[in-house]
Image: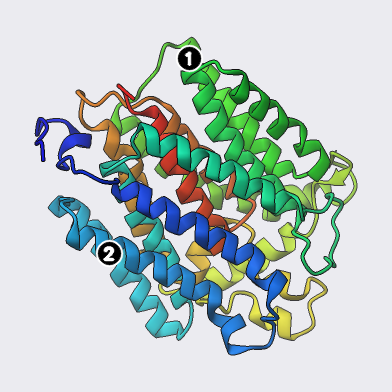
Amino acid sequence: MEKIEANNYLTTVKKREGHTCSFYLSVVLIVSMLLQFYLPVFVELEGTFFGGYIFPLLSIAVFAFEILFLSLRDIRISYRTIAILLAVACALIASVLVTNSGIEKAFGLLSILFGLFIINRDPLRNGERNAIFWLFVVAIALVLLNGVRGNAQLELAKGKFNPNTCAFLLTLLFCVSFTRLCSARSWKNIVLVVICFLLQFYYISRTALLGELIFVFVSLVCRAWKKNSYSPRTVFWTILLFSVFGIVLAWLYAEVLFPAVGYGKLVIFGKDIFTGRQTIWGFAFESIREHFWFGVGSHLNEAQYLAGSSFGKVVMNAHNMPLGLLAAYGIFAFVFFYLAFARLAAQPYRDKNNKVSRFPAIFLLTITIMSYFEVYLFSASNWIIILFTYGLVFSDSVAGK
């Protein structure tokens, strides 16, 4: 085993024969993703013990897998990183104990942080990256085969997947393909970028299309400014500030804009900009004021749901990740999680000898902005594939690939 220069962040891990940690993690993530989509198609899960716990158990399994690598592989963690991760874990555990709920989402949040750490430290190698990328393409194609056209369908036939979910997967594939295109101008990458963009008009998801446009726009702006990489401080504060802005945006939308404008005055893609989120966010802010320190766990807007809200169970989903995290787990978990998330986003840029390109930071920024409208990091079917995509984007962005 050959030991590489110790001053390079990405090479503090000894080179080994065999695969990287990210490769094994990617395989576990892609299998988990396909299980989440297709297991309910072939097996009746509704109303069963197995059906109620399969997705949370997948989150716990991924978390256990990551911890196994951190303990058995030569991946060293700084004391500051250990401290912030412990702070996140303690804040989440405190909320779970107070609210007696939310443990499955807590495991998911911790899995995201540990997953980012592992990918940053031991990224995919060339051969692994290509194999994982095409596995990714095939997996998304399998999901799209059963996806339905987007027009606010509330009832989906068995075996058919939500159009917003399909559009979100296309956005992730778009980000990977665009990153690869900027590194290698191959016709395959061009075709994938074009297909991922055009199919958004079939699924009609404004959030997914917004994600693609943000990723391209920020990439092109940075290219024009000749910013191929960033300082860690820039990445840290950008991710952190945009995370907090998610709360501000929800407040402006629900408490300021809606009372001033009302229904039917602002229409995008044939849809009114006010589709009910303003009501759900208004309930969430009430919940935060009443349970500021430790949140409400999985009981967000439960009173409104039990009272027969016209939104049904949808009212219990915050549809805004920063707002949802604050409401579910309280201020301590919110602050520590996003501090850790921003720190891990900035970590690869700390070593000046390590020329990581701009794309990993732009990808996490894109996900942060998209999460203003969905709780991506609470849903195992979303965060698992986000982590998988980050592994590909990061590995493609490492200098000397």
| Residue 119 - label | none
- Helix, strand or loop at label 1? It is helix
Q: Horizontal placement of 114 versus 73: left or right?
A: right
Please provide percent x and percent y for residue 12.
Answer: 15, 39
Please state the horizontal and vertical placement of residue 271, each as a whole percent of the image.
Answer: 86, 46
Residue 193 is drawn in which quadrant?
top right
Q: Which residue lies furthest to the front in this view?
A: 17
Whether residue 377 is visible: no
**Which residue occupies 48% across, 63% down?**
326
What color scheme is it?
Answer: rainbow
> Could you say which is closer to the camera, residue 338 or residue 104?
104
Disc 2 residue type?
Ile
Nearest to viewer (mark 2 / mark 1): 2
Task: Give whichever of 305, 17 is nearer the camera.
Answer: 17
- Residue drawn at the location 43% of the way across and 59% of the way down: 28
Q: Which mark is residue 223?
A: 1
Q: Does residue 98 sit above or below 262 in this rendering?
A: below
Q: In the figure, is residue 309 to the left or right of 18? A: right
Which quadrant of the figure contains the C terminus? top left
Structural crowding at the residue carrying mark 1, measured as other residues with C-alpha within 10 Å and reported as few (<14), some (14–19) or many (≥20): few
Mark 2 or mark 1: whose residue is earlier in sequence: 2
Q: What label does residue 67 carry, if any? A: 2
Within the image, what quadrant is residue 43 found in?
Answer: bottom right
Q: Is residue 56 left or right of residue 13?
A: right
Q: For the residue marked with disc 1, what is the amino acid?
A: Arg
Depth check, front residue: 274 or 314:
314
Eyeballing the image, is 174 above or below 30? above
Residue 301, percent from left and from top = 64, 75
Residue found 38% across the figure and 54% down from its top: 25
Q: Can residue 162 be seen in this view?
A: yes
